[in-house]
Image (cartoon, helix red, strand yellow):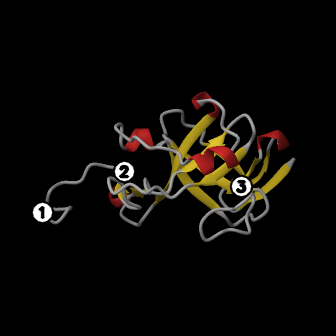
């Protein structure tokens, strides 16, 4: 299947790689189908979550454990049920990244991870009830003066 994208032009994707988000993403509830696009550089930890229907909608995503190795979340039972998760090995977890003009100030949303059942091709953005995480966790270490200390 051919997919038109703003960032990559026209690309060929396997239709079986489309992930269904029955509830959409926060602020984009009408967008129900996405595909993950990997960059060519294997050293690059960033990927793209591209809408399968809107060429202009794509999010930079990252494995949150790359940003915060001690990331420890509990996926709510309701989300596990909606995603048909039977085994921990069935899931992939991503965080949406905000890329500002100053790349060193890049942040990842650890409070609202995207959980994907890779076998069922189902996804959901989950809002955690966990004050250890924020929507703006720096991807790169900040110096004390950058943090305002």
- Which residue is located at x 39 percent, y 58 percent? 107
Q: Residue 84 in the image: x percent, y percent?
A: 70, 41
- Which residue is located at x 67 percent, y 45 percent? 81
- Which residue is located at x 77 percent, y 41 percent? 17
Q: Residue 136 in the image: x percent, y percent?
A: 38, 61
Residue 149's disc is 1
Given residues 130 and 115, the one toward you in this image is 130
Q: Secondary structure at mark 2?
A: loop
- Which residue is located at x 74 percent, y 57 percent? 22
Which quadrant does the C terminus fall into? Answer: bottom left
Say which residue label 3 marks. Answer: 21
- Label 1 packing within 10 angstroms: few (<14), some (14-19), many (20+): few
Labels 2 & 1 near each other (Cβ < 8 A): no
30 lies left or right of 102: right
71 lies left or right of 2: left
Residue 73, compared with residue 60, is above or below; it is above
Q: Residue 8 in the image: x percent, y percent?
A: 68, 54
Say which residue label 2 marks. Answer: 139
Mark pair 2, 1: CA separation: 18 Å
Q: Secondary structure at mark 3?
A: loop
Q: Earlier in the sequence, mark 2 or mark 3?
A: 3
Labels 1 & 3 near each other (Cβ < 8 A): no
**Residue 131's quadrant in the figure?**
bottom left
């Amino acid at each position: 299947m051919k997919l038109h994208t703003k960032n990559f032009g026209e690309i060929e994707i396997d239709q079986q790689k489309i992930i269904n988000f029955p509830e959409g993403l926060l602020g984009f509830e009408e967008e129900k189908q996405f595909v993950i696009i990997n960059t060519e550089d294997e050293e690059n930890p960033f990927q793209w979550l591209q809408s399968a229907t809107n060429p202009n909608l794509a999010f930079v995503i990252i494995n949150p454990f790359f940003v915060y190795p001690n990331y420890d979340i509990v996926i709510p039972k309701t989300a596990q049920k909606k995603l048909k998760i039977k085994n921990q090995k069935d899931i992939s977890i991503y965080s949406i990244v905000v890329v500002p003009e100053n790349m060193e100030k890049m942040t990842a949303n650890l409070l609202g991870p995207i959980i994907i059942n890779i076998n069922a091709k189902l996804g959901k953005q989950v809002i955690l009830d966990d004050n250890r995480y924020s929507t703006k966790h720096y991807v790169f270490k900040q110096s004390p003066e950058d943090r305002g200390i």
